[in-house]
Amino acid sequence: MTMAKIIVLGALFTFIALIVLFAIGYYRKSTKAVRDTQSIVTDKEIIEFLDSQPDKIMDSKILMAEFGLSKFEAGSRLNHLMTHGVFKALSTKGGLVRYYTLVKPIENSYDLELTDDAFMTVEDLLLIFKHNDYQVSLQELCLSTGLPVKVLLEEMKYFESEKVVKCLYKSSNGGMTHQKIYTLCEPYRSNPDQFMELKDVNFELEDIFNKVKKNS
């Protein structure tokens, strides 16, 4: 291999390494912004605020003006909800400005009588499924419980591992957005009222909630 090729390859690897480091740094900064601004505005409040817009569409500037977030913080919160299939992105013809709208309209009332626990219990989950005709998304879970999407993802991951629910994926935005749809597994699907109180599972969920909150 000639010296010129070695120099070119070295430059290429350096360039790739810089891109990877930038991506990792951006992801960590964005994750921190999502975590740190939950005390300013919750995921539920952002969903409800978007739904309150006359055309059900908003950009980061509208979110910034309403809640006093920085441009980066507002963009991070909106991208977070888009990545997890709660919002979908729209753009102008040139693609320079990104707008957001709900993946699915808010059709039901979410004033449910859930338990007083800080986390989502099995009883809560089954009640939410019943309220939504036994098919729920992260949007419905967030609106029902008020919990951050990050916490809900961890809890639902646990429910999947316990064979309580299964997760189905629906792609949109050219594959950029993957909406998660949760359904109940058997025997919960056929007779959910029989499993409204599972104390052992609820204990595990409390541990998961506390771990996520601690890492946040």
Image (cartoon, rainbow, N blue to C red):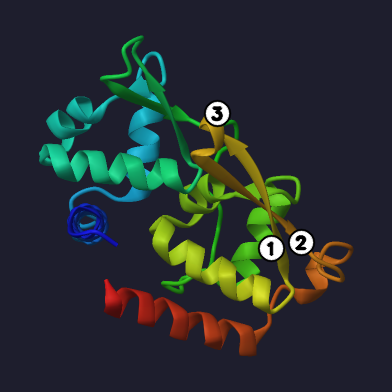
Label 3's element? loop
Q: In the rendered image, which quarter contains the N terminus? A: bottom left
- Residue 164 to residue 28: above or below: below
- For image coordinates 47% across by 52% down, the residue present is 142
Furthest-top residue in this view: 93
Per the model, the C-alpha gap separating discs 1 and 3 is: 22 Å
- Residue under circle 2? 184
- The answer to which of marks 2 and 3 sits earlier in the sequence is 3
Label 2's element? strand
Name which residue type carries label 2.
Leu
Q: Which disc, if any, is residue 99?
A: none
Label 1's element? helix
- The answer to which of marks 1 and 3 sits earlier in the sequence is 3
Furthest-front residue in this view: 2
- Residue 171 to residue 209: above or below: above
- Residue under circle 3? 105
- Residue under circle 1? 126
Name which residue type carries label 3.
Pro
- For image coordinates 63% across by 55% down, the residue present is 128
- For image coordinates 54% across by 88% down, the residue present is 203
- Residue 92 to residue 10: above or below: above
